[in-house]
Amino acid sequence: MSPINKFNQLVTVEIITFLFCFTIPIIQFAVQELLYVKLCLQNENTTDSLCHDRNWINKHKETEGKTSLWIMYINIAIVIPAIISSIFQGSYIDKFGFSLPTRLPLVGITIACGVSAIVALTDVRHELLIVGMVFMGACGHTPAFMMAANAYVVKDASGEKNKTLRLAIVGSCLAIGISAGTAVIGPISDHLGLYWVFLIGLFSSLLALLDSVLRVRAPRHQPPVPHGKHFLTKLKETLELRTMKSYIKVMTRSREHSRRLHMHLMTLVFVISFCALIGVVDVEFLYLTKEKGFTTTQASTFMSVAMLLMFFGKTLGTYVLSSKLGLNLIYITMIGSLSAIINYTGFSLANSFAALWASNVFKMFSGLNSVMTRSYVSGCVEMNEQGTIISFMSVTEAIFKLIASFVFNGLYPLTLTTWPGAMFMVAAVLCVSGLPVLGFIRWHELRTGAKYVVMNEDGQVMVDDNSNSKSDDIEIQTL
């Protein structure tokens, strides 16, 4: 086997995952700065330099408020079509393979970067951004791409250990890609101009699209798919309600030891912590650059470091607390919630750069919430329901991303003249509200003798009891 063929067998969707995730923060955070500048320039007697003047920013908070509302509009334009598209792309994978679902989101983000570059380079109004965002959402964006990437690895892996390793690598590509993309926004924008950020994003997404077309093959264990069908025929067969029916069936069917109740409550905790996180992400860049005096470079560096801390904290915390110490999933989720509460509270009350950086450190273990709640929920269902529950959680994320944007971006402008950090305190309160739910689940587990399913390193189903016994065999699912 030639070195190239061997490389193509070992490295499949990892490169396009990194490049796609590198481009995500460019769309998310650079577009926020572009919106602010465009809205600022619509005021009389303003210039680009005046829009970045600290005194002008402090006197014209209405521009910041309008930007927050436009971030909400952008999220609506992306999320609603992305929810619909990701549901049907999941069905497409089952019937016709991965060729379309691994490429369509790349096409969407390429178009969005191109439209954003045009808006940044010309005098075109900011409303044109909506066109690019709707197209990107209709192509599936992040929910569809990550669903396709993870499903590809599952079907391509040569064994359970190989699957676990490769899923971890894909997760690492996601975290490092997003962190790297966030880090470059500030320096490029401050020194070369905002339009260069979008051109870099355009190049990155085009490179990913080219790699997916020329190099990424069908996974090893993909069942035979029908060939020769017209695209419209495939679309018709994909557009059915079976996916939604499967969600309802998995979430409502009766389960022993009150596992259905526990699954519903843990999904509630997942939604609460996710809304807090996404709400904070939607206002954090504006808060740092317009309220706390960060330059774009300082803000992007700050947020990039936070993302790396979350990645390492999530990985280290899962390994030490779960695999080595054998701590119950609920207790680990509580640790993640407490980490998030301290972080959000610190953000809300911080009045200096040092205080903000100190609170950033506590973000390290907040990512445990997502890992442990997903693991717990997936452990409440049967093995043949794993794919459905993964897809359901992805769709749930997208829906509540929209709701979080309504709440946080809608209320943020109302807090600017009184307490700009109020929305971070709202996020902290949300996480606090999840702690009693976690406590009730744990109490009910002990009372009813409930058990949940985990997987050992050979992919065999195991039943874990309510003790905190240490077991190096058990590998908590972090799907």
Image (tube, helix red, strand yellow):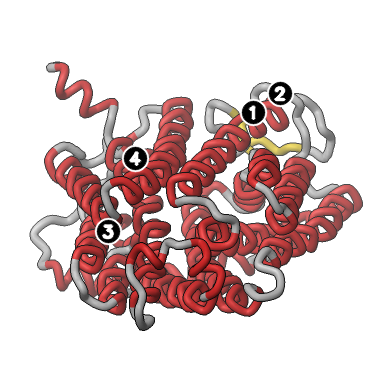
- Amino acid at circle 2: Lys
Using the numbered discs, state the Cα–Cα distance from disc 4 to disc 2 in whole angstroms.
30 Å
Q: Nearer the viewer, residue 445 or 225?
A: 445
Mark linked to residue 109: 3
Image vertical order of residue 90 relative to residue 61, above or below: above
Q: Earlier in the sequence, mark 1 or mark 3?
A: 3
Residue receiving disc 1: 319
- Amino acid at circle 4: Phe
Give how far across and how far down residue 356 sits, in percent: 66, 47
What is the quadrant of the N terminus in the image?
top left
Label 4–label 3 contact, CB within 8 A: no
- Amino acid at circle 3: Ile
Q: Earlier in the sequence, mark 4 or mark 1?
A: 4
Residue receiving disc 4: 18
- Amino acid at circle 1: Tyr
Look at the numbered disc 4 and give the secondary structure of its residue. helix
- Identify the residue at image location x=72%, y=31%: 321
Using the numbered discs, state the Cα–Cα distance from disc 1 to disc 3 in whole angstroms.
34 Å
Q: Closer to us: mark 4 or mark 2?
A: 4
Q: How many marks?
A: 4
Using the numbered discs, state the Cα–Cα distance from disc 1 to disc 2 in whole angstroms.
6 Å
